Amino acid sequence: MKPFLYTIILTILTVFSGPMLVAQEKFDAEIVSDLRKTQQYAFGVSEERHFKGVLHLYDKLLASGVEITDYEIVAKGKFVKNLVKGSELEDLYEEYKGKVRVSVCSVAMKKLGVSEDQLISGMEPVPTWTVRVLQLQAKGYNVLTY
């Protein structure tokens, strides 16, 4: 009896969770309608998981039909040491190079001993994380910081 019950539960979970997982890859129409009001996005990040999450969000926005003209990630803190050539993030960023700008806080770079030539190709140092985020806000970007 128990194997039969487990089979039924597994079948139900498979049938009903499959469409939900696919549906979650795009935003619903109301969200897309609201997000189409702007085309510039910026995110301040200080952890690898947020960096990866914001890159995934870029894909999800495009898949949902949101037009993006400018998309920038501003990195700060100890996380900056992960944005160097040869790191696992180099391969990940390669997919987004030319589409997503990554700015790196030069104050954090200095504290961590990361030079500009060590940064992943395409990433750009900025004077400070704070000033860059304020600059993007002044330019009308939707800005979130983590």
Image: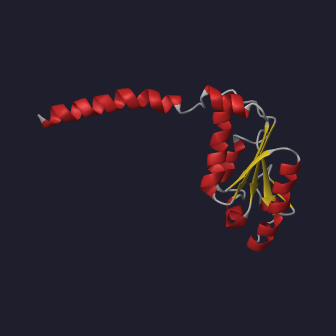
Q: The N terminus appears in which quarter of the rendering?
A: top left
Where is the C terminus found, in terms of image quarters? bottom right
Colour option used: secondary structure
Q: Is residue 94 above or below residue 26?
A: below
For residue 121, above or below residue 19: below
In this picture, residue 136 sits left or right of residue 13: right
Q: Is residue 77 left or right of residue 21?
A: right
The quarter of the displayed image where residue 64 is located: top right
Residue 22 coordinates in the image, percent (x, y): 50, 29
Along the line of sight, the residue nearer the viewer: 85 or 27: 27
Q: Residue at x 76, y 30 (%)?
A: 67
Closest to the observer, 145 or 118: 145
Q: Quadrant of residue 46?
A: bottom right
Q: Position of residue 52 (x, y in %)?
A: 63, 49
* 18 sits left or right of 26 in the view: left
Determine the image quadrant of residue 3: top left
